[in-house]
Amino acid sequence: MTQAGMAQAAGKPRAVQRRSPYPGWFFIPAAVIYVVLFLVPTFASLYFSLTRWTLFNSTFIGLENFAQFLREPFLIKGLINTVLYAAITSALKVVLGLLLAVLLTSQIAARGYLRSVVFFPVLVSTVGVGITFTVLMHPTNGMINEGLALLGIKGPGWLVDPNLALFSVALVDVWKGVGLATVIYIAGIVAIPKDYYEAARIDGATRLQNFFYITLPLSRPATTTVIILSFIGGLRTFDLIWAMTRGGPGFASDTVASVIYKQYQSGFYGLSTAGNVVLFILIAALVIPLTMLLNRKEGHE
Amino acid sequence: MTTTTRRTMLAGFSAGLLAMTALTGAAWAQSINLTYLIPSGADGVAVAEELVKSFEAANPDINIDIETRPGGSEGDNLVKTRLATSSMTDIFRYNSGSLFQAINPQQFLVDLSAEPWQADVQDSFKQVVTAPDGTVRGAPMGAAMGGGIYYSKAIYEQLGLSVPKTWDEFMANNEKVKAAGKVAVAQTYGDTWTSQLFVLGDYYNVSAAEPDFAANYTAGTAKFGTDPVAMRGFEKLQAVFDAGYLNEDFGAAKYDDGLRMVANGEAAHYPMLTFATTAIVASYPELIDNVGFFAQPGDDAAKNGLTVWMPDGLYIPQTTSNLDAAKRFVAFVASVEGCEAQTRAGGASGPYLVNGCTLPDDVPPAVTDMLPYFAEGGQNGPALEFLSPIKGPALEQITVEVGSGIRPAADGAALYDEDVRKQAQQLGLPGW
């Protein structure tokens, strides 16, 4: 006891543990990269968000940019749209991803082929997907509405109706992203020990009971991953919205990210930097509690 | 602090590059290499190439390389970045008017006030490339444009319509076109910038009624939302939607669709800037005689006139290392030979702003229709963005909303005033 205490007081075991196999200078290149590429821009953007910045010169104006950004007439709509979009896409990805994963882990014909079909859209460029669907969703010449017309249905203006535009983009986002959710779920489902299903079979469980009492609860880690990944993705969504509607018609499908981009486009660099800080805080404020909530529930299981 | 470091690094880098070019230059005897930055786009590139070719033929010691950049606000940011980092080309083409003021001309551009060719440049252009200290820093590149309405001559003949001088006559024409089963007004909100024309093109009518509007607007005392004359533009935009005169796919159609519709008689009218004449000539050469043009009608036939947009300017950044050669090229573009080279490459789309430049006899009817507004006794005046440094960036989204019935005109005008306030504050103007 005393010996151990003395050793600790001398700090010997700690010193031994702390000694790295690499000399100090070995870390300098990594540290330089980290400082130059991450720390400097982070603090520079915090500073510039407090200035009126024209690229040529910057004037310190305190928190005025934040006040202006929060006064943006479409910021509130953009905020609601952002959260709505993130919630819709991540909910649909969870539901569809789970169903597809159940289908693709069962014994069906051409399973490998179908898996790759589901995953394929994930690999395609987002902007390419956006442009393709903009053409498909054209109100009069688009293939979707022409197909509906054959059935005698007059299709809506998917991207030009202000009440629909955001949802149309969200559906395309789900189509593009559901493959990743499926793959995560497949991994989760495959990892469930077969014993559970065998025990359930002996008890005479139906397929539906198998799904609700075994597959669903035991793939909770996968669900948590899918929800958090797609929720963060939805909150920062920009490329698909920009490629398909540019926030339009009018401001109907604006998200926080597209509002920020428009400030940058107009040459309000300080203002758009302030917007980025706001977006960062927004994502942190929504995702950190969500993660804690999901992980705590997992612990209780 | 970061900007300074970046600037020094870039300066060092460009100095290295310059040293290398200087060395290679020596090997080629006396030839001077210039770089010339232009916005991309097929017709613009063709004009630049023709200008460079003609200039090089007359100046064999100078070689000019053309670089392209994206247009729109993407390109604005690129120009600002290159100026701020001292990496701008020797000559560049960029907007005049309010966007010109935004690149700090006094700090970055060479003063061209004393150049001999300025004597031949019209004053209306000089005032839109004049820095706050009163020096002229650019030369005209391209022809003056009008913002008004293209119309299908075929439909007008078929239905026996005449060119309207007042808004009521215009709406009456639209009613007849609609009754005949055709599209009265083509709108193309798929390209949002095209939605602003009814508002921006109405400015001549505003200034005819209230000559002080631009000054009061800059000072923050005149607003679109509270000035009934200024709000007319928004009301006109709403009126054509409410009356059901638009093409069915107006929300998704693009600029090219609008040109096609008015050229081949699918639609009777398309509000647009006259630079589109060049594009119609390029895409529908056999249909160009079907397309006419008139200024946006106001409420008083006697005061009808054309809202005019000034062409881009050519500028030389202060960082150029070949000032004399660059000035020679700018002088060439601002000369009669320069105008002729532009006409050869892109056709004529309007009057040039250099004295002595003439248009060929066989210009398209849309250009002929535009000339009376510029002739002696004709009525024309600059668009608001050339009289005031403020133009709200969200106008195109607001006009899409008003023009698609999402938002009433009065609301749209009030919202635009909010947008304008933000721009004025960012520019640091007094009184906001």
Image: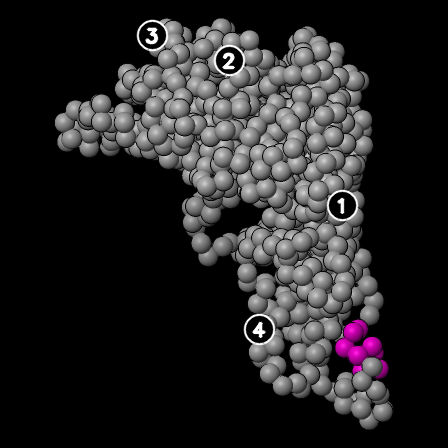
Quadrant into which the C terminus of chain A falls: bottom right
- Which chain contains the residue that carries disc 4? A
Please name the amino acid that badge 1 sits on.
Pro
**Residue A129 placement (x, y as % from top left):** 58, 57
Mark 2 against mark 4, which lies toward the viewer?
A: 2
Task: Return the residue at label 3.
Answer: B116
Please name the amino acid that badge 2 sits on.
Ala
Task: Return the residue at label 2.
Answer: B375
Closer to us: B424 or A90:
B424
Task: Return the residue at label 1.
Answer: A162
Spatial CA span between label 2 and label 4:
68 Å
- Which chain contains the residue that carries disc 3? B
In the figure, residue B302 lies in which quadrant? top right
User: Would you say residue B62 is visible in this rendering?
Assistant: yes
Spatial CA span between label 3 and label 4:
69 Å
Spatial CA span between label 4 and label 1:
35 Å
Of all residues shown, which one is farthest toward the bottom? A202
Residue at 69% in and 74% down: A101
The mark that comes first in sequence, 4 or 1, is: 4
In the figure, residue B297 lies in which quadrant? top right
Please name the amino acid that badge 3 sits on.
Pro
Total marks drawn?
Answer: 4
Q: In this view, does A243 lie to the left or right of A212?
A: left
The mark that comes first in sequence, 2 or 3, is: 3
User: Disc number at residue B98?
Assistant: none
- Which chain contains the residue that carries disc 2? B
Spatial CA span between label 2 and label 3:
26 Å
Mark 2 against mark 3, which lies toward the viewer?
A: 2
Residue at 60% in and 34% down: B157
Mark 4 against mark 1, which lies toward the viewer?
A: 1
Spatial CA span between label 1 and label 2:
45 Å
Closer to us: B378 or B17:
B378
